[in-house]
Amino acid sequence: MDPDAVAKVFVDHYYSTFDTNRAGLANLYQDSSMLSFEGQKIQGSQTITAKLTSLPFQQCQHAITTVDCQPSGPAGGMLVFVLMFHLMPTPQGSFYVLNDIFRLNYA
């Protein structure tokens, strides 16, 4: 498995879903997942999804210029830096977001 390819597919899927169906992001998080949103720490799939679906904007422009990825730990995780996603493998062979750092760029 190529970590860079997984990271690119994940980032494309995440931001496409973010813009079209934020509630659909719920399956990318688990109870142990943590989101830092503009400095606010939010834990758990339901709470994270509630935060993302309550944002006052429906779409935002995603200017993804680089995606950096590194293998993370013996369990097969990946550290993906767009701003940042930390992905961990599931027993089913997919990945979920363990950590997510989200910052708005006001330009």
Image (cartoon, grey):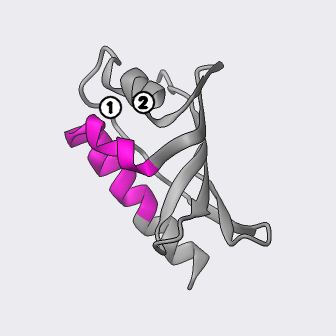
Residue drawn at point x = 34 percent, y = 37 percent: 61
Where's residue 87, x and y in %? 59, 57
Magenta stretch: helix, strand or loop mostly = helix
31 w.r.t. 36: above or below:
below
Furthest toward the left, the residue is 20
47 w.r.t. 2: above or below:
above
106 w.r.t. 87: above or below:
above
Kindly state the secondary structure of the residue where label 2 is placed: helix
Q: Does the magenta stretch include residue 20?
A: yes
- Say which mark, if any, is on residue 26: none
Kindly state the secondary structure of the residue where label 1 is placed: loop
Residue drawn at point x = 51 percent, y = 55 percent: 96
Range of the magenta residues? 10-28
Name the one closer to the observer, 61 or 86.
86
Identify which amino acid the numbered label 1 is placed on: Cys
Give whichever of discs 1 and 2 has the lower sequence position. 2
- Say which mark, if any, is on residue 46: 2
